[in-house]
Image (cartoon, helix red, strand yellow):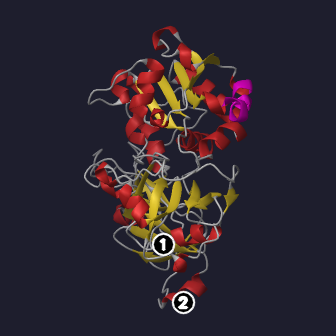
Amino acid sequence: MSVSLQNLKQADVSALATTLKNAGIAGAGGAGFPTHAKWERIDEVSSLLMNHQESEPNYYIDKWLGDAHAELYAEFFELLLENTVDLVVVCAKESKRDDWMENFEAAADPTVYLPDDLPIDASEESGIVVAYTDDRYEYGMESVLLRIVAGVALRDELPMDKGWLVQNTETVLNIYRALESGKSVTHKYVHVDGNVPHHRFLKVPVGTPASALLEAAGRSPDDLRDDEVLADGGPGWCFEIEESPDEFGITKRTNCLLVLDEDEAEENTLGNERINVLKARDWPGNHETEPTTLEPDEARVPLLTNPNFGSLVDQSRPIVDVGDTVEAGEMISVPGQAGISNAQHAPFDGTVTEVTETHVVVGRDAADVGASGGRILEHDHKVYWTACAECGAYIARPEWEHLGASTEYVCQDCR
């Protein structure tokens, strides 16, 4: 069971949410929460807000996506307006309008609000709206953005409690691709900046080791100094990475990888270990504004996008073993059934070289990995899985083989 753009009008909420879960979609920035948890409440929502703020001074992911794929977003929003919501609001910064929003405005023909016109009255609006804000960093936070743009105040509430669904630009693209062509999330757009020779804007497989990104930015991971730290996130909102560059795999929420001076990071660490170095240096500079695709030799695909959500989000469960061959987009771990969870997928054709409590490692060349890694890859087969006939959740085939090939599978939650 899956939902597509063609049957979106007839789809029920559980089927839509399951489609997003099986595609492995998580917030492409911020907390990286599984997206299907928001869409399970789509019946309570009348307005979609696309957070197009991109407040970090070295970020171009959302701006580039909105510009390069303007017609795609416009088409998707029109479909959502026909079948799902009454209002779509795209929130961007007025300072970026001339450089980055011309194509989108031409494609979507939206109603435009400038900063002095805000907040809008959602009860009086419909269709596609572009709401331009002042150039303030904190407007990138969804609670602040909703208050500024729509006059909606959240007090220990979620946007859905007020009739709003908030997604960032890259997440919306991933939702569209899952519904339009059944594509799972296998790649992530990410920047590399800080103490590196070159700022990079890259498209990488999920799980790409940080070491590969550093090398792409002209910095050998072996040359990182003892008084430097590696951080996950942009200048205004990042966290120190405890793992080595080889062991940290880019997650679905990683927008930027930073190399910072240790004392600079310590002096600018706020509550909850968040690092904010926006004012510590001059970030504008010679930045790449279009992505280059990076193809690493291996990917360390995490089973949980954000480990800090371990108490709220159930880790996905691997369905592959060392030596299994996988194809790009093939499911390598199924959603956990104890709560909110996502599937994970092979980012490229390759061989599983390691399965740990936290990651599935996929290498491009089985022969090379076997020789260099000291592991004998004893088998070379695919692991098959099936979908529950009731809810559509994917389950590894070994759990139901005893039922017989002709038996319709129903998962434990639906029995």
Tell me the mark number nearer the camera, choosing from 2 and 1. Answer: 1
Picture quarter containing residue 195? bottom right
> What range is drawn magenta here?
97-106
Considering every residue shown, the one lying at the far top of the view is: 124
Image-based side of 30 in relation to 117, left or right? left
Confirm whether the magenta stretch covers residue 300: no
Mark 1, secondary structure of its residue: loop
x and y percentages locating residue 101 in the rendered image: 69, 31
Q: Give the label on residue 245, or none.
A: 1
Vertical relation: 401 (above or below) 177 = below
Point 49% across, 37% down: residue = 137
Picture quarter containing residue 155? top left
x and y percentages locating residue 410 in the rendered image: 35, 49
x and y percentages locating residue 128 in the rendered image: 60, 20
Q: Give the label on residue 372, or none.
A: 2
| Among the two numbered marks 2 and 1 on one chain, the one whose residue lies closer to the N terminus | 1
Q: Is residue 314 visible?
A: no
Question: How far is mark 2 from mark 1, CA to CA?
Answer: 19 Å
| Relative depth, front residue between 66 and 275 | 275
Point 66% across, 29% down: residue = 74
Vertical relation: 365 (above or below) 397 = below
Going by the numbered disc 2, the residue's amino acid type is Ser
Going by the numbered disc 1, the residue's amino acid type is Pro
Picture quarter containing residue 320? bottom left
